[in-house]
Amino acid sequence: MSERPASDIDAAAVCSLIEAVDKGFQRTPLVGVGEMHWCPEVLEQMFALIEAPAVQAHTQTVVVEFGSERHQDVLDRYLAGEALSDTALSLICEDTLHGVLWSPWVYQQFFEHVRRVNQTLPPSKRWRVLLAEAAFDWQTATETRWQAAMDERDARYADCVTRHVLARDDKALLIFGAMHLIKSTLPGACAPSMGTLLASQLTTLWPVIDGHTHVAADTMTTWPVGSVIVLDDAPAAGRWPFDRFARKGQSVGHTRNYCDMLWHAGAFTRKVCLPEGRLSDAGWLARTRARIETRSVERQRQLWQLFPEHVLNELGVEVAVRSFLESELN
């Protein structure tokens, strides 16, 4: 039996992103909005959540994936109004396990946006951004140590949220790559996601973009861009196969098992593209090169594939085969 199209879903089940987050906080102390790496337009839409009184009424804490806890004090001072150099701001994101992944400007721009909003708020109402990634020592890095840190990421994310939010009987908005927020473990996963570990305390919004889903085209056109389907109020949508959204190429069960709401983020395309401003920044290139050279020969080859040929030539780096690196998209 085919599922009803979105146009047949009760209007009460569909709301705006801000309304969805507000509803989420009425259910649970944590609301996670999934981000799509290499698709900056998705995170850009979340900027409005920081400005929204309906969200501010619940929390002044946002926890993000795209920053190292090593730089928490620096970010705190910056969000409070202290000036920060471009390099210091960049290091918050790049000094992480996947620094290249955070090279698009949108991540720094998120911090800049929070700072601007804070300047309009009284001190007691200002946002704090918690950096969830545990500090990683690149000076002693090896491929084995890097992989061990990767394997522990979700558990460490969950620990950060538990210690800094739940243990204080607080609430928080979580902005992470969508796969970290799923509330059931996918087949083949090496460890449970943060969302699985925090499932009882978390409402998850999964982002959907046109061209990145197997939902029928007529459904996407009748599901308004920017709107959110609350699955508790839309049983048919909750029964949609989650593999329509997760790109896993296998049956993984119903969507309602993995998230609580579906957010139609828009007609965007994910594209792995390092910003020209990074590629022309000698300091960023030097720091990034130093980190890449701690990796295994194979991983170095794969990571250099993300760089355009003219940059590789300038750096004297030879890459025998250029192919798409799936792990850097996720």
Image (tube, rainbow, N blue to C red):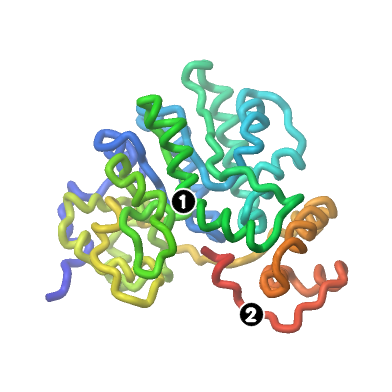
Q: Is residue 96 visible?
A: yes
Q: Foreground: 155 or 16?
A: 155
Near mark 2 (Cα within 10 A), the count class, few <14, some 14-19 or many ≥20, is: few
Q: Foreground: 148 or 272?
A: 148
The three-letter amino acid code for the residue at tag 2 is Ser
Residue 320, image x, y percentages: 75, 83
Q: Residue at x 39, y 52 (%)?
A: 181
Q: Quadrant of residue 144?
A: bottom right
Q: Secondary structure at mark 2?
A: loop
Q: Residue at x 74, y 61 (%)?
A: 294
- In the image, taking residue 119 as reference, residue 320 lies left or right, namely right
Relative to 328, residue 119 above or below: above
Q: Which residue is mark 2?
A: 323
Q: Residue at x 57, y 57 (%)?
A: 148
Which tag is nearer the camera, tag 2 or tag 1?
1
Q: Quadrant of residue 81?
A: top right
Residue 20, image x, y percentages: 31, 43
- In the image, taking residue 225 as reference, residue 122 lies left or right, namely right
Q: Which residue is mark 1?
A: 154
Q: Residue at x 38, y 27 (%)?
A: 170
Residue closest to the far bottom: 321
- In the image, taking residue 53 as reference, residue 236 lies left or right, namely left
Q: Secondary structure at mark 1?
A: helix
The three-letter amino acid code for the residue at tag 1 is Asp
Q: Are marks 2 and 1 in contact (CB under 8 Å)?
A: no
- In the image, taking residue 132 as reference, residue 168 lies left or right, namely left
Near mark 1 (Cα within 10 A), the count class, few <14, some 14-19 or many ≥20, is: many
Residue 112, image x, y percentages: 62, 36
Q: Foreground: 135 or 275?
A: 135
Relative to 17, residue 144 above or below: below
